[in-house]
Image: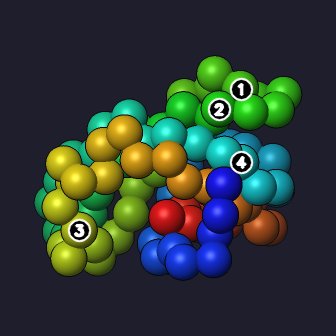
Amino acid sequence: MSTANHDQMEAMEFTSPLADGLYDVIIIWADEVGDGALSIDLVITTGDKKGELLTLRAQHLTQRDPIDLAAHPCRVRVLNGEPEILL
């Protein structure tokens, strides 16, 4: 999966912890949850965590249509416990 041309979504929070690393994921669904935040459901597609479901909360992403994110493959990078989606 190429990350040469990607958007970074910051201000993410996990609903459950995940070890530092880079994870291939597919966005299952995204919903607006108020205050410019999105709740993004993902599934990990490779490695030891394959099949695990995650929910990330992203702040200030009003420029993104949640429907456009559904079924989108991307990566999640976790560094020092802080997640970041790489589209």
Quarter of the image where one finds residue 70 = top left
Q: CA distance from mark 1 to mark 2?
A: 5 Å
Most distant residue in the top direction = 51
State the residue in front, 2 or 81: 2
63 up-or-down from 80: above or below:
below
Q: Is residue 26 left or right of residue 39?
A: right
Q: CA distance from mark 1 to mark 4?
A: 9 Å
Q: Are marks 1 and 2 in contact (CB under 8 Å)?
A: yes
**Amino acid type of the residue tagged 3 in the rendering:** Arg
15 up-or-down from 1: above or below:
above
Q: Secondary structure at mark 3?
A: loop
Circle 4 crowding by C-alpha within 10 Å: few under 14, some 14–19, many from 20? many
Question: In the rendering, which numbered label is found on residue 4?
Answer: none
Q: Secondary structure at mark 1?
A: loop
Q: CA distance from mark 3 to mark 4?
A: 22 Å
47 up-or-down from 33: above or below:
above
**Disc 1 marks which residue?**
50
Q: Are marks 1 and 3 in contact (CB under 8 Å)?
A: no
Identify the colour scheme used.
Answer: rainbow
**Disc 2 marks which residue?**
45
Q: Where does residue 18 sit, x and y in percent of width and height?
A: 72, 44
**Disc 4 marks which residue?**
23
Residue drawn at x 82%, y 32% is: 47
**Amino acid type of the residue tagged 1 in the rendering:** Lys
Q: Earlier in the sequence, mark 1 or mark 4?
A: 4
Circle 3 crowding by C-alpha within 10 Å: few under 14, some 14–19, many from 20? few
**Amino acid type of the residue tagged 2 in the rendering:** Thr
State the residue in front, 77 or 71: 71
Q: CA distance from mark 1 to mark 3?
A: 26 Å
Question: In the rendering, which numbered label is found on residue 64?
Answer: 3
Circle 1 crowding by C-alpha within 10 Å: few under 14, some 14–19, many from 20? few
Q: CA distance from mark 4 to mark 2?
A: 8 Å
